[in-house]
Amino acid sequence: MNLRVVSLFSILLFLSACSLSNSSEESLNYSFELVDQIILDPNKIKDESVLGGLSSIDYLGSNQYIIISDDRSEYSDARLYKLQIQFSEEGIENYEFLNTIYLKNELNNRFSQDELDPESIRYRKNSNSYFITSEGGRIGGYIDPFIWEINKNGEFLRNIETPSLFRFYEDKGVRKNGAFESLSFENDTIIWYVNELPLIQDGMSPGFTKGSYPLRLVRHDIKNNKVLAQYAYQIEPLQKKPIPEDGFYINSVPEILWIDDNTLWVMERSYTTGVGNFVRVYQVNTSKASDIQNIEYLEGSEFNSVSKRLVLDFSDYNLRIDNIEGLTFGPNFPDGSKSVLFISDDNFNKDQETQLWLFSLKTE
């Protein structure tokens, strides 16, 4: 079903954003306008793979995008999809899955079930390669999270050596399904990533009361394989309790997007049993935050977190919100405004949807 935007749902969200230059204290005003929301057709097979679990999206150019499935080689072998999307100011006109690219391990073989948990993907133009993240595997204990560079055929090129604290330990380190689900490029040599849930030694997972739920937002020089800084990002508490009260709930960070020198967008996605999904995007500024890379345990330590402010709340649109996990800029609209696209992960669940949301971002 194609849900075209009408005046009732064209809601402008105004915010004061950080300057695009560190040397200026002036701020720019932005507005997000919902252009369209469509549901991608489920239950399709492409190149012998089951379409689903679309967890991250990035723009390649020429109206083409690369998407990663978070399938742990359970429904089909771990894979990427190339997707073509045509849209205008009127909405999304059509889309087509072009081909499937299967991921390979260091021995150039396809992954066995649970050897990885693919989550995020970004395109690096100057090397014509992809960077992907994995939250870890489930074979023989835990296979640690990783960030890899791969070629366009899905073959391993190199491992990005991430800090050892982002590993599985008994009493510290990353939580199950709480590692690298996000990734963004600042430029060709610097990437940003963040753990989805707080490390065990840093604090509790988000609950329903205001508290300290810190993640580690990492700025990493991939040319010299050096962490430049880590900043604490505080997740918000959940908004509503589950029904029944002992039901499942979570709030975490599935994706980030670098904006300028000190500014990123961080997407928080929460789910509460019996209530549903909530998705918000916050604009983050790191200029006054502490570098925490030498603080092993954040719980009980003193530090300044990044500043954040809400810039987009999907609940404002009175449309069904599914498990949105992917975020990217697309091509500009004819009027010069930027396009911003979000995609949801259906978890291979017949009761969920693979949604594609299209926004126009205007600078005032």
Image: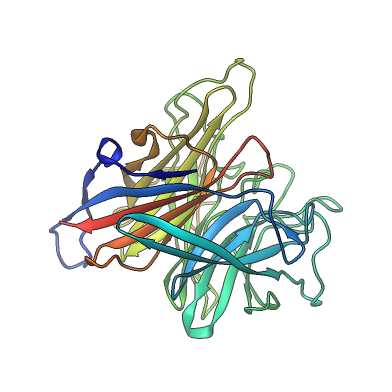
Q: Residue furthest right?
A: 140
Rendered location of residue 160, percent (x, y): 61, 71
202 or 98, which is in the foreground? 98
Rendered location of residue 285, percent (x, y): 31, 54
Taking 336 as reference, is 198 left or right? right
Rendered location of residue 187, percent (x, y): 41, 75
| Quarter placement of the C terminus | bottom left
Taking 201 as reference, is 102 left or right? right
Q: Is residue 360 above or below residue 267?
A: below
Name the residue at 63% across, 79% down. 151
Quadrant of the image occupied by residue 96? bottom right
245 or 13, which is in the foreground? 13
Rendered location of residue 294, percent (x, y): 50, 57
Identify the colour scheme used: rainbow
Name the residue at 82% across, 56% down. 113
Taking 313 as reference, is 230 left or right? right
- In the rendered picture of this protein, how many numbered marks are placed on residues? 0
Residue 180 in view of the camera: no
Q: Residue furthest top?
A: 244
37 or 25, which is in the foreground? 37
Taking 262 as reference, is 73 left or right? right
Residue 9 in view of the camera: yes
Name the residue at 52% across, 20% down. 241
